[in-house]
Image: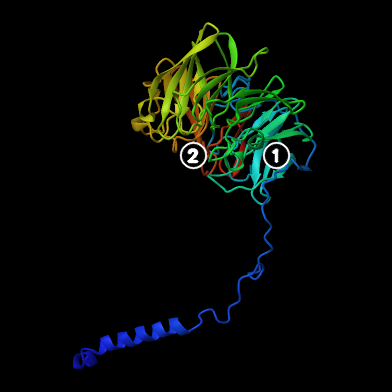
Amino acid sequence: MALFKKNPSTPVILAAVVFTSAFLYWIFADPVRGLAARVPGMDNRPPQKPVSDSVFIGENFEALGREVIAAPGDWPRFRGTGFDNISTENVPVAETWDTTGPPVAWRLSLGEGYAGAAVHNGRVYVLDYNEKRKADMLRCFSLDSGRELWRRWYTVQFKRNHGYSRTIPAVTDKYVITIGPRSHVMCADPQSGALLWTLDLEKVFGIPGTVKGKITPEFYCGQCPLIDNGVAVFAPGGKAIMVGVDCSSGKVIWETPNPDSLRMSHASIIPMTIGGKKMYVYSAIGGVCGVSAEDGDTGRLLWKTTEWSPSIVVGSPVYIGNGDIAVFGSYGAGGAVVRVKAAGTGYDISVVGKHKSSEGLASEQQTPILKNDYLWCVLPENAGANKKQLACFRKSDLMSPVWTSGKENRFGKGMGPFIMRDDKLFLLDDDGNLYLFRIERSTATLLASHRVLDAIEAWAPMALAGKYLILRDQRNMLCIDIGKKN
């Protein structure tokens, strides 16, 4: 400080000297002297191989066990036998749990995702993603013990985008079919795991002019496969809005043209009978359509509407009777009713009762359950005062709930699954808390609750087969014994 007082110009002189020295070094010095140009392998990494987009679907197989103890119960596809998420099996459910909760029959670790289970003939089928092998993997387990019996997989690389796997297999006595995150279809024998046929939906039905014929949504395929009378039905949404594949041969036997360029959503195809006509109904990106499911004109486009077209669709359509179909959109889009009425040789289509998520029945992730004349759902975060609550609506009025669980009984982010048997409803919230309700027409009474998982995003649909309830979060799957004890 004394120096500055004697000569006030000293700091300025010092700064000038430092700047001049740095400038001369920048001009004349060689800052990279002694450094070698970077070449592959110099950083001790293994040689990098170019990534091929060729995917050999189902190419690998591993047998792990044989014995399967017969365990009654069936949940052969998304939303169960009746496509309504209601189990009709005559297996009583325990109405109370002690402090330890319902017994856990078995548990296992999975790759990150939201794919639920299908159950058939004492076996559990899950489409997993093995992050170490970079592989879509169909895994088969014993329902009774949880022992893995076999696995079939194929290498396919893609970036994690809110997890990997999302879809539930469809299984019959002869076939088990999966759709992977990038729309790769695999059909195998459900007993032995033998590969029967494969189909790359993007390559076959991709949109010309797009990267790799892209048809798969941004957050990967969430469409669950459908098997109907020996025919696998898919909605690729590229060159064809819907296609049918013979399960015995793997040949495409019908295609539904797609002149309006409807795109694949995260919803699944739901069979419905409307006005005496069986049809496949699909909520696509860009609109809703119905395709004939009857012999003689299978695959014919019966009707479509582009009036209801939210940007993201996850919940599948629900038939509520009298030609009315409840449809749902995510991210605040809410819901609507598509009215389908026969008119001569065709159909009159109208969209009625549109509402936002804050105005009525809405679903961000799951598909509501229709029980008698009432629709049940956990409302999403953007549903206003009733957000995150279990709610009940008359099917004739989707804007005014007749019952809600109340603001003190909210369930995570409103994204978790729910499932029914008789008058019982199981609800799993995002954090792994399992709730059991008794349903009496339009009201629900909480019977029991227990934290079964320290969960992260427990959003996968559940399966209810016999006395077993199968549920999961991002990385863990549990099989819970919910049967009533003698």
Query: Residue 113 location in percent, x, y?
Result: 58, 42
Q: Which quadrant of the rendered structure holds the C terminus?
A: top right
Is the image coloured rainbow, by chain, by secondary structure, or in one colour? Answer: rainbow
Kind of residue sitting beneath label 1: Arg
Q: Nearer the viewer, residue 60 or 110?
A: 60
Q: Is residue 392 left or right of residue 226?
A: left
Q: Secondary structure at mark 2?
A: loop
Q: Dot 1 corresponds to which residue?
A: 139
Camera-near label (1 vs 2) is 1
Q: For residue 156, which numbered disc appears in the image?
A: none
Whether residue 62 is situated above or below residue 378 in the rendered picture: below
Kind of residue sitting beneath label 2: Asp
Query: Residue 397 location in percent, x, y?
Result: 39, 17
Q: Secondary structure at mark 1?
A: strand
Whether residue 461 is situated above or below residue 272 in the rendered picture: below
Give the crowd class for mark 1: few <14, some 14-19, many >=20 residues within 10 Å.
Answer: many
Mark 1 or 2, nearer chain start:
1
Query: Residue 228 location in percent, x, y?
Result: 67, 21
Is residue 369 visible in this depiction of the protein? yes
Count of labels in the image: 2
Q: Quadrant of residue 78?
A: top right
Q: Is residue 289 left or right of residue 248?
A: left
Q: Quadrant of residue 184?
A: top right
Q: Dot 2 corresponds to which residue?
A: 430
Q: Nearer the viewer, residue 392 or 230?
A: 230
Q: Which quadrant of the rendered structure holds the N terminus?
A: bottom left
